[in-house]
Amino acid sequence: MASELLTSGLDKALLSDDTERLRITPEGIQWVQRCLDVIEERSKLMQSKGMTKFNFVFGVSNSLMVAWSFGALPGYFWIVYVIEVFVLLPVRWSRMIQREPKEHLYWLDFCWCANFVGVVLLIILLFYEVDLDVQKWAFCAAWGLGNGPLLCAIAVLGNSLLFHDFDNASSVLIHLFPSLVMYEMGWNREAVQEAFPSIFTYHFFNDIHLWHDIYNNAAMSYFAWLLPYAGWLLTCGMSAPSCGYDTIFHFTMRGAGGHVTSKILRVPPEEHKELVRANSFPRSYALVYLTIHAILVLLSIPVALLCYADKKIHICLCGSMVLLTIYNASSRYTFYMVSSYGQALRRELGIPLTRGASAILES
């Protein structure tokens, strides 16, 4: 692609002498330099996003380790999850606070908070004796949220298992790992109990009721997050961008979610574009966002009930979501390696994406 653009771009800059030999004019040299500058800038951009040898080796090795431990160490997989959190999330945090606007308010979103609470509960179980009724309540809530909203979010958000990208790896972690952990704790509970007999007793497992225990506990946990988050978003959160901070709400409204919200509220396209440009949205946008968020979460919790009803359904859903993250990643890598440089050159040279490189001769 790049060589074709260079050849076409030099067509009007090449001169023929008496010996019918071609030589590059100063104008041609400028074309070459422009193309090289675009390619170098694109390479630097990819490296700034983490595409380095170290990150790629770490990402591939980490993925292989997780896959191996899921099958070989079912009793200890929850420890792997905790370790992954303490390794990946500090890296994610350092990137969030360096960006402009700063992104660490993203961690107030439900998926992040659910993982933080889950990790804290696992650490508490490791060091303190917890009442059996509390264990049952927490297990049911974790089952409902981990195998419902968090797992389904992979498909909704389009998570990608990019080996070099810690941001995307962290997103896969918080959405996929809770379901994998609950699979091990539910269907391989004998191995978990054998590894940690003083922590996990599972006397309650066969007494769990799908709707009363799993659905109700998961829904109550969700609303325990939703109510304070809604209060914060409708007050302080709306003005976060003016203070140099971004939020998941504003990020969503600048994208496809904003178009859906504007259509629901019947906001004219021109007015919505102005709201996006200013990164300032009315509270009506936030109310619609919170309502849709709540509906999607409550509708996805029943997926967790299916996971509890049948082991095969659970592992198939987990496997499907893993394959989806790989598929999404393959699309991204294909773009990076095949299309991104060509598109960057086209933008620089003013060639429309729908035209061939010969369009440069018409300019």
Image (cartoon, helix red, strand yellow):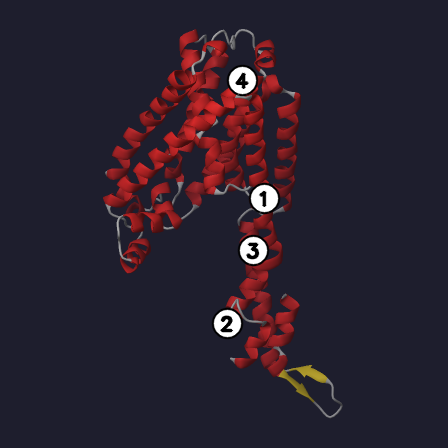
Is the N terminus in the top left, top right, bottom left or bottom right quadrant? bottom right
Q: Report, in whole angstroms, how far the alpha carbon at label 1 lies from the one at label 4.
A: 28 Å
Rendered location of residue 335, percent (x, y)? 58, 54
Pointer 3 residue: 44
Pointer 4 residue: 186
Kindly identify the residue that appears in the image at 74 percent across and 88 percent down. 20
Sequence-first disc among 2 and 4: 4
Residue 55 in which image quadrant? top right
> Relative to 37, is 201 above or below?
above
Q: Amino acid at mark 1?
A: Tyr
Pointer 2 residue: 350
Q: Report, in whole angstroms, how far the alpha carbon at label 3 lies from the one at label 1.
A: 25 Å
Pointer 1 residue: 327
Dot 3 crowding, Cα within 10 Å, few <14, some 14–19, many 20+: few
Nearer to us in this view, 273 or 218: 218
Kindly identify the residue that appears in the image at 63 percent across and 43 percent down. 56
Nearer to us in this view, 98 or 260: 260
For label 2, the SS is: loop
Kindly identify the residue that appears in the image at 40 percent across and 11 percent down. 134
Dot 4 crowding, Cα within 10 Å, few <14, some 14–19, many 20+: some
Rendered location of residue 59, percent (x, y)? 61, 38
Q: Nearer the viewer, mark 2 or mark 3?
A: 2
Q: Answer yes or no: do the residues labelled 3 and 1 have beta carbons within 8 Å?
A: no
> Relative to 331, is 298 above or below?
above
The reply to whether residue 274 is visible in this rendering is yes
Q: Report, in whole angstroms, how far the alpha carbon at label 2 lies from the one at label 4.
A: 57 Å
For label 4, the SS is: helix
Q: Nearer the viewer, mark 3 or mark 1?
A: 1
